[in-house]
C-alpha cells in the first residue's frame, strides 16, 4: 500500500497505531521526535509522514514546514489540538490533511491511501497547455483483449495484468459513460468492503505510473471525483 513514517512520542499509542496500519497493508517506520525522523529520512524516503504536533524539541509544525520544503512526501497531522487556529496553522505549515485525535486506524489508513493516490495522479496528469489538456482527448489509443496490451498513439505498448485488463476493458466498453467505483469492483469480482476500494485505488495508481513509464503518455482514463471513472480518449478495442 504505502511506505509510512509515524512520528509520535507516546510510545504505546505509536506502537498500537503502527501495528494497525501494518495489518491494514502499509509498511510503517516509527520515530518519537524530529531528530529520529530526520535520521531515518537520511537513508529512506516515505510516501506519507504522519506527525503529531506535541513533540519534544521540535513540534509538528516545524517538521511539517521542513518536509514541505525538503521532501516529496505526503503529510498528515494527527493531534488533540482541534481549534480553528491550530488547523489553519497546520495547513499553512504544509500539511495535506489535518486529523483530530482520537483517530481510528481505518480512517487514517484511508486518508493515507487517498493521499498517495492523489499525489500519484497529480504526477502523471497531462501538463496544462498541451493539446491533450486543451481538447480533453488523446486519439489513437488501442487495447487488445487477447494480448492484454494497451498501445498509445506513439506506438508504444504496456502489458496489463489480468485485473488491469478487466478494468480497462470495462471502461472501453462503457465509452461516454461515467462508471462507478462500485461497478468496477463488481466487475473485478471483489466484495464491497473498504479494502476492495483501497485495492482498486492502488491498482489504478500503479497502472497510471506503468502507462506513463512505458509510453511517456498519461493513461487516458479520468477519475471523476466522488463518482468513478471515464475515458478522456478514444480507445479502440481489438482482439
Image (spheres, rainbow, N blue to C red):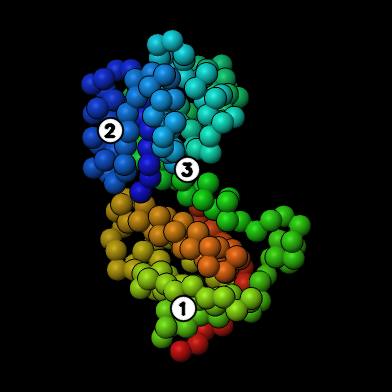
As rendered, which of 118 and 49 lies closer to the eye?
49
- Are the residues flagged by discs 2 and 1 in contact, CB closer than 8 Å? no
User: If you read the primary sequence from the N terminus, does the residue marked by circle 3 or circle 2 appear first?
Assistant: 2
Q: Secondary structure at mark 1?
A: strand
Q: Is 153 positioned to the left or the right of 67 in the image?
A: right
**Res. 80 in view:** no
Place residue 15 in its image quadrant. top left
Q: Which residue is mark 1?
A: 149
Q: Distance of mark 3 from mark 2, alpha carbons?
A: 18 Å
User: If you read the primary sequence from the N terminus, does the residue marked by circle 2 or circle 1 appear first?
Assistant: 2
Q: Residue at position x 47%, y 83% from top?
A: 144
Q: Secondary structure at mark 2?
A: helix
Q: Residue at position x 46%, y 45% from top?
A: 116
Q: Which residue is mark 3?
A: 115
Is 178 placed above or below 102 here? below
Q: Which residue is mark 2?
A: 18
Q: Distance of mark 2 from mark 1, alpha carbons?
A: 38 Å
Q: Is 118 positioned to the left or the right of 3 in the image?
A: right
> How many residues crowd around disc 1 within 10 Å: few (fewer than 14), some, or many (20 or more)?
some
**Res. 39 in view:** yes
Place residue 183 in its image quadrant. bottom left
Give how far across and how far down residue 96 sits, in percent.
52, 34
Amino acid at each position: 500500500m504505502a511506505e509510512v513514517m509515524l512520528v509520535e512520542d507516546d510510545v504505546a499509542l505509536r506502537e498500537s497505531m503502527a501495528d494497525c496500519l501494518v495489518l491494514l497493508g502499509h509498511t510503517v517506520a516509527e520515530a518519537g521526535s524530529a531528530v529520529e525522523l530526520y535520521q531515518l529520512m537520511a537513508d529512506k524516503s516515505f510516501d506519507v509522514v504522519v506527525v503529531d504536533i506535541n513533540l519534544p524539541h521540535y513540534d509538528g509544525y516545524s517538521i511539517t514546514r521542513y518536509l514541505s520544503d525538503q521532501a516529496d512526501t505526503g503529510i498528515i497531522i494527527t493531534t488533540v489540538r482541534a481549534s480553528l487556529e491550530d488547523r489553519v496553522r497546520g495547513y499553512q505549515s504544509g500539511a495535506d490533511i489535518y486529523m483530530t485525535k482520537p483517530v481510528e486506524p481505518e480512517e487514517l489508513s484511508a486518508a493515507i491511501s487517498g493521499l498517495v493516490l492523489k499525489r500519484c495522479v497529480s504526477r502523471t496528469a497531462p501538463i496544462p497547455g498541451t493539446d491533450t489538456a486543451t481538447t480533453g482527448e488523446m486519439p489513437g489509443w488501442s487495447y487488445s483483449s487477447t494480448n492484454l496490451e494497451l498501445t498509445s498513439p506513439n506506438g508504444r505498448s504496456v502489458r496489463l495484468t489480468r485485473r488491469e485488463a478487466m478494468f480497462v476493458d470495462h471502461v472501453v466498453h462503457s465509452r461516454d459513460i461515467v462508471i462507478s467505483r462500485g461497478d468496477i469492483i463488481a466487475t473485478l469480482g471483489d466484495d464491497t468492503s473498504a479494502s476492495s476500494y483501497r485495492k482498486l485505488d492502488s491498482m489504478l495508481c500503479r497502472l497510471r505510473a506503468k502507462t506513463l513509464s512505458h509510453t511517456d503518455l498519461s493513461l487516458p482514463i479520468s477519475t471523476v471525483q466522488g463518482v468513478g471513472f471515464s475515458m478522456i480518449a478514444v480507445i479502440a478495442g481489438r482482439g
